[in-house]
Image (cartoon, grey):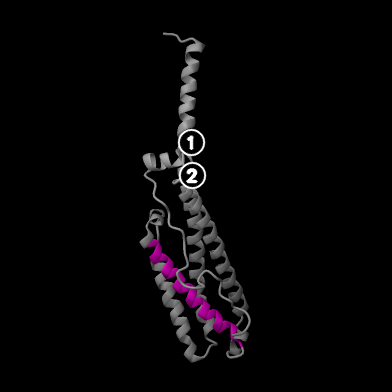
Amino acid sequence: MTYSYSSILPRIAVVALAATSLAGCGVNSVPKAEEVAKAKWADVQAAFQERANLVPNLAAVAKGAAEQEKGILVGVTEARAKATSIQLSTDDLKDPAKMKAFQEAQNQLSGSLMGFGRLLANTEAYPDLKSITNYQMLQSQLEGQENRIRVSLRDYNEAVRVYNTTIRTFPDVIGAKVIYGAKPMVPYEAVTPGANVAPTLEGKL
């Protein structure tokens, strides 16, 4: 059986129209937006892990502190252990309870580091800190890492906003609900006041 060009053309047009319609219903935009958000979350996890890797170095710096200030280091160490014990998969990004537990653990570590930052800043009370070779380097590393965390969280939240908007707006909502059964992702929120602000490791109390 042979087909003339004129008979095939309408079928091609129908197929093209169907493909365009499906594309406009979130078939492509929904998974793309989700993958971007997942990639941004990987950046968040990497930034938090890099911060956790810095914590062991605090022990060397704290050697110059007064005895009563060792409690700050203990708090930081315990907060680090808790923060690193809670891991989220990309599927967990749609689970508010698991995200909340992760946020609370990371924010607790942020709060502990802020306390340690105040200790480092008070060099008049602890002059021995000035003589530690890695003091300035650790100051810079902690400040830089907190800033990287803030940037990665901002980027993740923006990607989540785009994804959540995509799955709720027409026509993408059709593909999101019918094809993917998409659920909104949870943005990252600092539950500890000031936890999203980098510790101040310079100056005086």
Looking at the image, is mark 1 or mark 2 earlier in the sequence? Answer: 1
Per the model, the C-alpha gap separating discs 1 and 2 is 13 Å
> Which element is circle 1 on?
helix
The boundaries of the magenta stretch are 98-123
Q: Position of residue 174 (x, y in %)?
A: 41, 39
Where does label 2 land, which residue? Answer: 32
Quadrant housing the N terminus:
top left
Q: Amino acid at mark 1?
A: Gly
- Label 2 sits on a secondary structure element that is helix
Q: Is residue 50 above or below residue 59?
A: above
User: Residue 54: percent from the left, percent from the top?
Assistant: 52, 72
Q: Which mark is residue 52?
A: none
Please tell me whether residue 111 is drawn above or below residue 127 in the rendered image. Answer: above
Q: Residue at x 42, y 70 (%)?
A: 105
Q: Measured from the top left, where is residue 60 in percent x and y?
A: 53, 81
- Using residue 127 as the reference point, say whether residue 181 is left or right of it: left
Q: Which residue is mark 1?
A: 24
Amino acid marked by disc 2: Lys
